[in-house]
Image: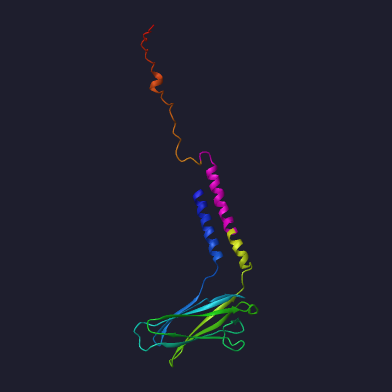
């Protein structure tokens, strides 16, 4: 019975940790264009009034044709739902642009930073598009969606106090069962105490002292 209780408590604790961890999803795409390998990673949800980033990783195999090439990167986002301090000139343009120079055998990274979900937008799903182009070749376009959701009811600063407190509350039943088990008679004993016999009397105590010879008395 005690073993089944401990299993139930372990399952409840694991479910609590999963619930506290929250959602962890992302949009990821890999491909190749004009001899350049790319990998794009971006979360597919954003809390209102919170910022997200998008990462692009470019790489070229060693010994590839041509020298250093310039790759142009653009990220189109709905200006009515998101804003960024790094967007292209023009209020509410809804576009972030950048460029990278990459040579054979190199790997470069570029991040679209500071995409903030506007609070007035409310929960919804919004279209995004990543564009990659090198030289006169056909640009590579990747479309994906980002969902905006309400933020946590509890401020993040308070969560640093609330989460340890909840984990402590989940551990209290386990601690109580431990005390009940150890509080039973003999709960702390693992080996029966050995009974010690009465120590044997030393031989020099048992033996009587030998008679000492009479000493001659000299006048």
- For this rendering, which residue is in front, 132 or 114? 114
* Residue at (63, 64) in percent of width and height: 158
Outermost residue, front direction? 219
Q: Quadrant of residue 203?
A: top left
Q: Position of residue 4 (x, y in %)?
A: 50, 51
> As drawn, is 20 to the left or to the right of 195?
right
Residue 183 is covered by the magenta coloring: yes
Nearer to us in this view, 181 or 218: 218
Task: Establish if 216 lies above or below 190.
Answer: above
Q: Where is residue 205 in the image (x, y as percent from the top left)?
A: 41, 20
Q: Can residue 1 be seen in this view?
A: no
201 above or below 21? above
- Residue farthest along the right direction in this orientation: 120
192 shown above or below 79: above
Among all residues in the image, which is located at the extreme top? Answer: 219
Q: Give the range drawn in magenta.
A: 165-186
Residue reaching furthest to the left: 63
Residue 9, image x, y percentages:
53, 55
């Amino acid at each position: 019975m005690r073993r089944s209780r401990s299993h139930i408590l372990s399952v409840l604790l694991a479910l609590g940790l999963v619930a506290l961890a929250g959602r962890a999803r992302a949009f990821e795409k890999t491909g190749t264009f004009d001899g350049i390998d790319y990998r794009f990673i971006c979360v597919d949800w954003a809390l209102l009034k919170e910022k997200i980033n998008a990462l692009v990783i470019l790489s070229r195999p060693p010994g590839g044709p041509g020298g250093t090439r310039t790759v142009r990167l653009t990220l189109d986002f709905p200006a009515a739902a998101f804003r960024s301090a790094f967007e292209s000139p023009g209020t509410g343009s809804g576009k972030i642009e950048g460029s990278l120079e990459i040579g054979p055998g190199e790997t470069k990274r570029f991040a679209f930073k500071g995409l903030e979900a506007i609070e007035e937008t409310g929960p919804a799903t919004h279209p995004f598009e990543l564009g990659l182009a090198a030289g006169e070749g056909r640009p590579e376009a990747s479309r994906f969606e980002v969902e905006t959701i309400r933020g946590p009811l509890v401020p993040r600063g308070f969560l640093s106090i609330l989460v340890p407190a909840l984990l402590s509350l989940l551990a209290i039943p386990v601690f109580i069962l431990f005390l009940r088990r150890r509080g039973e008679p003999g709960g702390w004993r693992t080996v029966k105490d050995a009974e010690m016999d009465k120590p044997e009397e030393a031989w020099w105590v048992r033996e009587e002292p030998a008679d000492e010879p009479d000493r001659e008395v000299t006048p």
